[in-house]
Amino acid sequence: MDRARNFMPGPNQELLDAKPLRSLAPMFPAPMGVNINQSSTPPLVVVTPVGQFPTGFGAGSLPAVGSLATFSATANAFSPAGTSANVPIDVTPVSAYKTRSSGVTPRNDDGEPYSVSQTSASERQAKRSAGLAAEGSNGVKVKRPQPIYRNHVSGKLLAFLPTSDSTPREAVEAVHMTFEALRRRHLQMDETLDASRRADLKAGAIMLASDIRANVGKRVGTVPGVEIGDIFYFRMELCIIGLHAPSMSGIDYMSANFGNGEDSVAICIVAAGGYENDDDDTDTLVYSGSGGNSRNTEERHDQKLERGNLALERSLHRKNEIRVVRGFRDPATITGKIYIYDGLYKIQESWKERTKFGINCFKYRLQREPGQRDGAAIWKRTQRWIQNASTRGRVIQHDLSSGAETFPVCVVNEIDHEKGPGHFTYTTEVKYPRPLSPMKALQGCGCQSVCLPGDANCACGQHNGGDLPYSSAGVLVCRKPVIYECGEACHCSLNCRNRVCQKGIRYHFEVFRTTNRGWGLRCWDPIRAGAFICEYAGEVIDELQVNLDDSEDDYIFQTMCPGEKTLKWNSGPELIGKESTYVSPDEFQPLPIKISAKQIGNVSRFMNHSCSPNAFWQPVQYDHGDDKHPRIIFFALNHIPPMTELTYDYGVVGAGTSRSKTCLCGSLTCRGLF
């Protein structure tokens, strides 16, 4: 094996004339009715959010999006048809943020550096409309990157997008939440129509055509609002948040000025998991170059030192930081794969290696930069625990549920000398003050075997507004006032997709000691957005049976109005021609049900409050029809990485309660009280 720190072209090897990125044509999926060649002015290529789409996914396959069905092309963006590219649209751009210094200056399509100075939205829009360049703090006139999102599409206010004072994390979460909502809704519609096209690509195309994305503009180093350990299930998720631009290629690269010349360098790679390292080595990655490895034997060829491979070789010499997204097998998902952002790496060496298919492949050894929080290491650690729970250290109680749950619920204390939570009786059920029999009965369906999407004769589908509430993977599509699952009165089997919550917990939970909020709850498994987490178990109590001013009972659940993040979870049905389902705090209607988990309860009693939660509660019915006393079920608000504390919003102070406490959630958007 020929290992070398530098590649030199041999006598039979010619180094290709690699052109800088700004001279290449963009790979936008053209919206219907748009001729990309209408404008003679080349678009900004350095901020192209995605690479090529899979074959067959382009202008002809872009789904109709109501008022967004057609667009007019401009030099730097798409604007809704019927509007002028020179008329200012109401945009809320994100300011430029400084990242870790790497000695690299990103360049725009004119070869000029992007500035990090901040100006107001109105100033930027005025300069953009007048065709002028903005002036940076160093006096150099530069072109600004495009705004990361628009608050209006075709004149309609998009309530689910963040405001101008949102943090970068809020902006990324809002964009990603919108993508997930569109993907779930398209998946639901495709299942109803028995279609098989990729819902993730449809959602991505709609968002790109609507210019709803985060962190537009390529950059070296960290991406504002994206945190190490964030998990993803589709490549398109990486595109729309600005982490990795190509939707298919594993190497993202750009042209940058290093002071002593301009070079094309790699800025992000996706290691799909085909070449794994030693399980214990989480700081070193051996990455294989792109190209040559076709499924068709006749099309296989040696990899060439061009494009992404050449950019990786240049990064070896330039020593610039490269973002790494690592892929792992996850049998629990339909795709069978999960992607984890693992932070910044640098290339240490490169060499050629002959593969089992007989082609020469470029190899690059990358070393993780020190001082970063764990990312992929947490995944490998928790996978070992799942395989053998005895390998989890600092456990003070091996199963809090005493066998009541499918998987043991361990108790861990790595903070102080507390021996465990206070005494309570563990239960997986809700105890009602009166028997269920006098309650209103819930009409069941007559479906044979399982309920099918689009079946107009399914009573449970009609209870839920005509659509089954869950995807085939058991993921909730959108929030509703009440979700109706199939119950004992239904003829369908236990394998019906509309039986999710009643099957109980399916995750490996642990109760752990927090630094300042008592005991908390987290999970060894990754939890995807919309997935069922657990039910709030306990005793249903009447208003007369509880003194809400009794500060000793901190385990009372009430359906108080949550914060904006939870209310906006449905995110953007307007983009596919549907009516908005957004419920404002003024429109929110609480339910009379109250549940106490002080004496009896389950893992949900350990879920702490957060003003920026990752879970939300949803009323669900399946064993009776009294909508005033539903079951309270928790679902994932966004993708939750392993070992992340599970939290929900207890409610906004002033929304009908006299009790309030000082909030210690630590969120950048903390309200101070809950």
Image (tube, grey):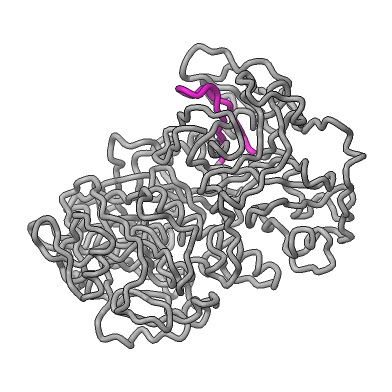
Asked if the stretch drawn in magenta spans residue 521, the answer is: yes
Residue 548 lies, with reference to residue 526, above or below; the image says: above
Q: Position of residue 167 (x, y in %)?
A: 36, 48
Write down the quadrant of residue 193 in the picture: bottom right
In the image: residue 642, left or right of residue 82: right
Query: What residue is at 57 percent from the left and 30 percent from the top?
Result: 521
Query: What residue is at 21 percent from the left and 75 percent from the top?
Result: 130
Q: Magenta span covers which residues?
A: 507-525
Q: Is residue 291 visible?
A: no
- The foreground one among 20 and 274 is 20
- The foreground one among 588 and 532 is 588
- The foreground one among 158 and 228 is 158
Query: What residue is at 44 percent from the left and 47 percent from the top?
Result: 340
Asked if the stretch drawn in magenta spans residue 319, the answer is: no
In the image: residue 415, left or right of residue 221: right
Q: Position of residue 69 (x, y in %)?
A: 50, 79
Query: What residue is at 33 percent from the left and 68 percent from the top?
Result: 48
Q: Is residue 256 visible?
A: yes
Q: Position of residue 171 (x, y in %)?
A: 40, 53
